[in-house]
Structures are given as C-alpha cells and as structure tokens.
Image: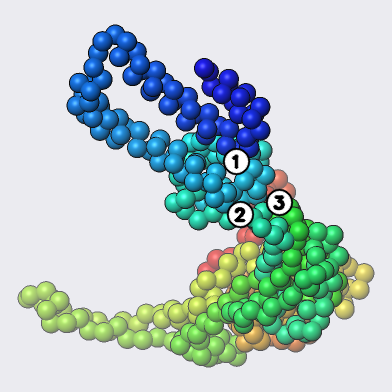
C-alpha cells in the first residue's frame, strides 16, 4: 500500500488533516517492518538469529537518524499540543511569517516577503516562539517617540493621541496610552501603546503611525531633537595673542620685539673654542591661538563672498559705483551669526583676514575694527583688478578646481 493510498483511506475515515501525514508515515513504516519479518520467515530465515546484527545496526542507525527522530517526535508533540497551527502568525528567531503546513519532520513558514522557509520541528520545542494568533489575536504595539527639551508635555500628549487615533487599524478599546519613559541626554522620551486586531499588519501600522506622528508634531510646532554635544575650547595663550594684536593695532611693529639667543652649553662648545659666541637678536614669532591655527581661512573668505555672505554696499564717495564695500560691524555680525564666534573671536578672525590679505581696508593705516570703517575683499581691491588687467587669460578669482580662488600676498 502506497503512502497516497493511506492518505486516501484516512481522508475517507475523516481523520483530521493535521494527523493524516503522521499516521500515514507511521502505518507505512510499520507495514514495511512487518512485511520484512514475514518474508524472512517465508524463506526459512530465523529472525531471532538476526537479533544481534539488528541490534548493532540499530545502534549505528540510531546515531545516524538521531536528528530525524528528534524532529519526528517533535512533530508528533506539536500535533498533539498544538502550540502552533496552520494560519498562525508567528516569530521564531529572526523569522516572521504565517504557518502554512505542519509536517511530520518540519514546518513550512511563509514569510512577509512571500518566501517559504522550512523549519525543523525540534526548533519549535527548543527555542522561544512568539505566536500572535494563539488565543486572542489582539496585540499591543509600542512606538517610541522623542521630543526636544522645553516642549509642552500636555501638547505633546495631545499631538500623539490625535496621530494614532486617526489610524483605522488602531483599536479605540483598549484605549491608546502615552507613557513618559525617561529624560534622555538630549530629548524627552515617550512611548506610545496602541492595540491592533490583526497582528499581521503590525509592521505597516507602525510605519503609518510614524508618518502620522511626524506630521502631527510638525503641525503643533514640536521639535524632534537630534543628539548633540557642546564643545568648549580654552587656550591659555589667547590673552597673550590678543595683547600682541592690540599692540599691532596701535602701530607697534612686531619686529620691535626681540629676544637674545641663549648661550650654548659648555658641552656644546667645540674644544678648543675658537671664539666667544656672539649675542644675536632674532625676531620672535608669536604663537597662533587655537582659533586661528585650525581655521580654514580660504574657505571662510569664500563663504563671506558667497550668496549667503556679507551684504555689500557702495562707497559714500562714489554712490553710482557697484557695491563692493562692507563695514567692520557687518563683518563682525556675520561671523557671530553664521560661524557662532564670540565678539572677541570675530575680531580676532577679522584681523587675521586683514593681515593675510584676504580683505583690505579703504584707509591703508586702519586695522580691523567693529565700526563703520569700509573694507573690501581682495577680488575687488585695486591690486586684484590691476592683476586681472595685466593677465586677463589667467583669472585670479575662480570657483573651479584648477585655479586659485584667492591670491593675497603671503607673509
């Protein structure tokens, strides 16, 4: 009798479909074993004489089919206890899908990607299984949300409830809940608890809720923060550099600051000494503060001249000319607003731009000041215009990758 014949008989006997495969396989193997014993007796072979050989073979076969036997017994237990059934929406490990068939050795799961995966039955008994369809299909979804510090908590709760209650898959009984979970490093953390009657749609429901929550928060003007950290830089030499720049502002040349070179140590003097070392004076280069040492001055000058740069104005002496001038006050305000410098830092950067030749003062003897004094960029200066006239085929100022953007005099 074939396996299909056994299944046909079990169907006619109205045996439950889940038991047909197991009973069919058990009956088929049992009949095969009895048939083998009967044939041995018919040929005059004493089956008892084969007991020792059968026991040895049984041990070897037992080790070989240990996994198969484990899966067969697991399938029998699953069929009797029914922790999972055909049509259940389950999660086992990383697999999420619908049970399509529970067989004698394995179970077929159809994932959300419409891919059929065959899982051994023993895995359902050896690991944790989430069955959303077991018993009551109503399940709860958790959606985390974070808002910025300073937000109105009552308004946040109202915005979140309005967003989730509008979704058709969210049940109004039990009611949705908004839990205030914690005070985060840069945000207030909430968690939305909603109930749904179809767990198979939970992933799409979460996505729809995230869209609705974002729109509701934007409607109420509630900010969703991002992780941020404040970095405070301190330079022990900043006061000294500011004092040096102040001296330069009142026409005290830096070259007037000299220092005597130290005399060489006795161990460094050649023996016999030819002559006494002569006292020398060398120019002392003041160290740069961290603000200027890490500053990309070319990129800063380019940004100041860009579409979002400093507002230019015309010269009071030539009202009909093109706007190519800006005041020191406008430059300081731009540096504070766009680059978040302090007033002292903006002044330091402005003096550095002037010293490096990226900006020019209309009055040649004037330093960079937070006043209505006029300045212009190098591209608008007489030197740059003269250079462009002398070499029209080699532009000085360009936004390409192969030409210079600026060409100030480098000290």
Q: Earlier in the sequence, mark 1 or mark 2?
A: 1
The answer to whether marks 2 and 3 mark residues whose Cβ atoms lie closer than 8 Å is no
Asked whether the residues under the numbered discs 1 and 2 touch, taking CB atoms below 8 Å apart as contact, a structural biologist would say no
| Residue at image coords 58%, 21% | 4
Q: Which residue is mark 3?
A: 200
- Distance from the alpha carbon under mark 1 to that under mark 2: 13 Å
Q: Is residue 161 above or below residue 69?
A: below
> 10 Å neighbourhood of mark 2: few (<14), some, or many (≥20)?
some
Q: Is residue 382 visible?
A: no
Residue 301: image location, x then y, percent: 67, 67
- State the image quarter where residue 16 is shown: top right
- Name the one closer to the observer, 23 or 232: 23
Pointer 3 with pointer 1, Cβ within 8 A: no
The answer to whether residue 104 shows anywhere in this view is yes
Tag 2 secondary structure: strand
Left or right relative to 203: residue 69: left
The answer to which of marks 2 and 3 sits earlier in the sequence is 2
Question: Which residue is depicted at the point 52% across and 82% down?
Answer: 233
Q: Position of residue 338 (x, y in %)?
A: 71, 74
> Any mark on residue 109, and which?
1
Residue linked to disc 2:
131
Between the residue at mark 3 and the residue at mark 1, the CA separation in whole angstroms equals: 14 Å
Q: Secondary structure at mark 1?
A: strand
Q: In the picture shown, does residue 351 fall above or below 395?
A: below
Residue at 50% across / 56% down in the picture?
128
Q: Nearer the viewer, residue 276 or 113?
A: 113
Task: State which tag comes first along the sequence, 3 or 1.
Answer: 1
Q: Depth check: give the residue in front, 140 or 209.
A: 140
Element carrying mark 3: helix
Q: Which is more foreground, mark 2 or mark 3? A: 2
- Specify whether 29 is left or right of 364: left
């Amino acid at each position: 009798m074939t396996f299909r014949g056994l299944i046909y008989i079990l169907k006619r006997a109205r045996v439950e479909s889940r038991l047909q495969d197991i009973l069919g396989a058990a009956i088929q193997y049992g009949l095969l074993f009895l048939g083998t014993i009967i044939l041995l007796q018919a040929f005059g072979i004493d089956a008892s004489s084969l007991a020792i050989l059968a026991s040895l073979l049984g041990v070897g076969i037992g080790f070989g089919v240990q996994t198969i036997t484990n899966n067969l017994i697991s399938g029998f237990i699953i069929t009797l206890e029914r922790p999972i059934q055909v049509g259940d929406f389950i999660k086992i490990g990383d697999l999420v899908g619908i049970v399509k068939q529970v067989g004698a050795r394995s179970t077929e799961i159809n994932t959300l990607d419409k891919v059929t995966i065959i899982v051994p039955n023993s895995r359902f008994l050896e690991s944790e299984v989430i069955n959303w369809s077991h018993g009551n299909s109503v399940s709860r979804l958790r959606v985390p949300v974070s808002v910025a510090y300073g937000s109105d908590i009552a308004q946040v709760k109202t915005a979140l409830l309005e967003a989730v209650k509008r979704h058709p898959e969210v049940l109004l009984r039990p009611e949705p809940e908004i839990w205030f979970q914690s005070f985060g490093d840069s945000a207030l953390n909430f968690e939305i608890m909603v109930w749904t009657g179809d767990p198979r749609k939970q992933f799409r429901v979460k996505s729809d809720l995230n869209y609705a929550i974002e729109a509701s928060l934007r409607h109420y003007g509630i900010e969703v923060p991002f992780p941020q950290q404040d970095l405070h830089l301190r330079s022990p030499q900043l006061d000294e550099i500011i004092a040096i720049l102040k001296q330069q502002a009142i026409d005290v040349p830096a070259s007037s600051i000299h220092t005597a070179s130290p005399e060489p140590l006795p161990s460094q003097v050649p023996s016999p000494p030819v002559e006494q070392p002569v006292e020398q004076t060398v120019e002392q280069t003041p160290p740069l503060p961290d603000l200027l040492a890490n500053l990309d001055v070319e990129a800063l000058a380019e940004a100041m001249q860009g579409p979002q740069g400093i507002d230019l104005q015309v010269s009071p002496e030539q009202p009909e000319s093109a706007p190519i001038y800006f005041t020191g006050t406008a430059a300081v305000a731009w540096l504070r607003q766009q680059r978040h410098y302090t007033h002292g830092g903006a002044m330091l950067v402005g003096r550095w731009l002037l010293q490096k030749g990226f900006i020019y003062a209309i009055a040649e003897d004037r330093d960079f000041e937070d006043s209505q004094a006029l300045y212009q960029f190098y591209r608008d200066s007489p030197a740059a215009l003269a250079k462009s006239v002398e070499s029209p085929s080699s532009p000085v100022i360009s936004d390409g990758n192969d030409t210079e953007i600026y060409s100030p005099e480098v000290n």
